[in-house]
Image (cartoon, rainbow, N blue to C red):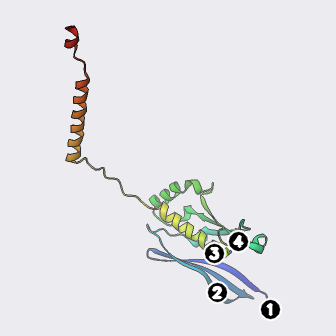
Amino acid sequence: MAGKMLSNSLAIIRYRNSVCVVLLNTAFCGGIFIYAHVIFMELFRLKNNIIIPESSIEFRYSRSSGKGGQNVNKVSTKVELIVDVAVFECPDEIKDQLQQKLASRLDVQGKLHLISQESRSQWQNKKNALRKLFEMIEDASHVGKDRIPTKHTTASKNRRIQKKKKKGEIKTFRKRKFDDFEAE
């Protein structure tokens, strides 16, 4: 009998404005599916109808610095999430806006790299990296409202004119009167 093979798979399920990210730990024995264990399931609400294909998300693992105890030199808990922003399914204006706002975080190929190593657990770091990704996309795709310039109120205009008049009067009192000096 062949040994048991464990693998991780990521499923992104989209329903209306929500995205459900499911991270599964699956087990196969001799090519036959044995079980799947849900490691992480999170519901994110994405605006602007952005669809992230599962094929554009890639995970890389390495040894993490920092806490970890005896596992720090043995287990690869640091997670690097790599996403190709160019393959997002969304309107072109939003895609351009995403690429502009995330330009400092994109590499030469236009891929976004996110690193998570806060936790001792690889699964928790995966979860954190995905959360960071969705929050970053949400922030970058936010379209701000155009500012409507406000007008000065009548009272503020009157106050400004009164201050100017008062300042002008003070300046006129400071002027020397040359008629007084000529008589001496």
Ranked by sequence position, the earlier of labels 2 and 3 is 2
Task: Identify the residue position indicated by label 2 in the image.
Answer: 36
Compute the Cα span from label 2 to label 1.
20 Å
Ranked by sequence position, the earlier of labels 1 and 4 is 1
**x and y percentages locating residue 130 in the rendered image:** 58, 70
**Mark 1 residue element:** loop
**Mark 4 residue element:** loop
Compute the Cα span from label 2 to label 4.
21 Å
Compute the Cα span from label 1 to label 4.
31 Å
Task: Identify the residue position indicated by label 1 in the image.
Answer: 1
Task: Identify the residue position indicated by label 3 in the image.
Answer: 124
Compute the Cα span from label 3 to label 1.
33 Å
Compute the Cα span from label 2 to label 3.
18 Å
Three-letter amino acid code of the residue under disc 1: Met
Q: Quadrant of residue 129?
A: bottom right
Three-letter amino acid code of the residue under disc 3: Gln
**Height in image: 174 above or below 10?**
above
Task: Identify the residue position indicated by label 4 in the image.
Answer: 77
Q: Residue at x 20, y 47 (%)?
A: 155
Q: Quadrant of residue 17?
A: bottom left
